[in-house]
Image: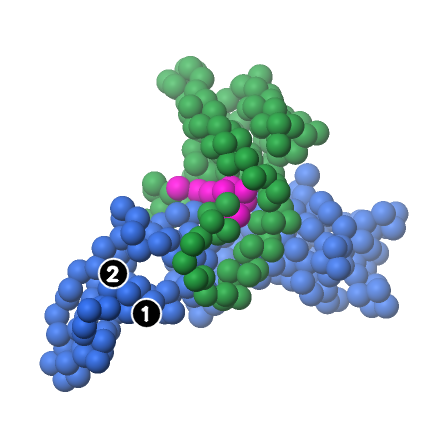
Amino acid sequence: MFYLKTLKKDLLLEPQFFGPNLHEVVGRLLLEQVEGMSLGNDGFVISVFSQNSANTSMEMGTIEYDTGAANIICTYEAICFRPFRNEVLDATVSNVTDLGFFAEVGPLEIFVSRFNMPEDIANTGYDSVGDMWVSEDKEVEIKKGCGVRLRIIGITVEAELKAVGSMKDDYLGLVSAATI
Amino acid sequence: MFQDDLLETENVNTLKFGPGFEEIQCLTHTEVYQILTSKTHDVQRTQAYTKTIEHVKRFGTADDEKHAITTELRQALETFERDTDQGTETLHSYEIVSLCNLMQADSTVDEAIALIPSLSRKFKEEDIEALLDIIRKANAAR
């Protein structure tokens, strides 16, 4: 789920940047350090809103004793992305293996194991020649580039945000054919 | 398994998003696309950004230059309310976005309830049909 969030970040600004362009430098530093990153429970930061919006501010913190750098507390608004348990999402298949397949939603990778696929696909099995999962009636082919609708059943918030999904319930499964 | 629903801190079926997400402001695919492409400053082309643009372009209605339709749809869903025995029910931000992202022209009430179970706890079937109607009309106007 994509959502808007107001977040806080502590930035360390070196003394060489103390000057008339301080605000721009801090803005740039914020973008470099935060955009595209996974912030644990808050999810992936996709894009920071421009610095002039209502909820952004920069508070001068303290100067560090050893280095002379200033600790600046930035409050900013960003578009973030995070999966939630039992959420239904559309995803693009990125990699197919004999244990299941990986699908991507923006920066997030979701794994769907063969045990979380409908029985008619899981039983027929993995077609290693075509690198895809095929259903019994040969109608449904899950391969790289396909669009699939899945439900998030588990999330890990460790080094990288990762999720596990399921395609077993009603109305889940293939939604669009491969575009590649 | 459904009894666990009531004990967890995070489960969208009961509209629980965990600590820090009580007032979550969700965004539909189309809205994300419009925001990301309207940026005026130099955007860092991080991998997350590129992948997100590809994703929302594929699964949203990206060729919608008419921002007005997106805003109208959002307003119509935000002001949707029905009086029930539990009081006046409105849509949660997550439900609004899920409906916009997942429902298509041929979607049925059963599909809406299967994919977004929290709806069935708040609204009757006729109300859900009315919601699907609002979305169908907006998409037809694009």
Towards the viewer: B50 or A143: B50
What is the display colour for chain B? green
Mark 2 is on which residue type? Cys
- Residue neighbourhood size for the residue with mark 1, other residues' Cα within 10 Å, grouped as few (<14), some (14–19), many (≥20): some
Residue at which label 1 appears: A29
Towards the viewer: A167 or A22: A22
- Magenta includes B30? yes
Q: Earlier in the sequence, mark 2 or mark 1?
A: 1
- Callout 1: SS: helix
Instruction: Provide the letter of the chain coloured blue.
Output: A
Mark 1 is on which residue type? Leu
Mark 2 and mark 1: Cα distance apart in space: 11 Å
- The residue lying at 79 percent from left, 61 percent from top is A132
- Residues in magenta, as a range: B25-33
Left-right relation of B107 to A108: right
- Residue A164 appears at what percent x and percent y? 57, 57
Instruction: Identify the residue at the far bottom of this view.
Output: A66
Q: Quadrant of residue A171?
A: top right
- Residue A15 appears at what percent x and percent y? 19, 79
Towards the viewer: A85 or A48: A48
- Residue A146 appears at what percent x and percent y? 72, 54
Label 2 marks which chain's residue? A
Quadrant where the image shows the C terminus of chain B:
top right
- Residue A23 appears at what percent x and percent y? 24, 64
Q: Which mark is residue B48?
A: none
Left-right relation of A89 to B22: right
Residue at which label 2 appears: A74
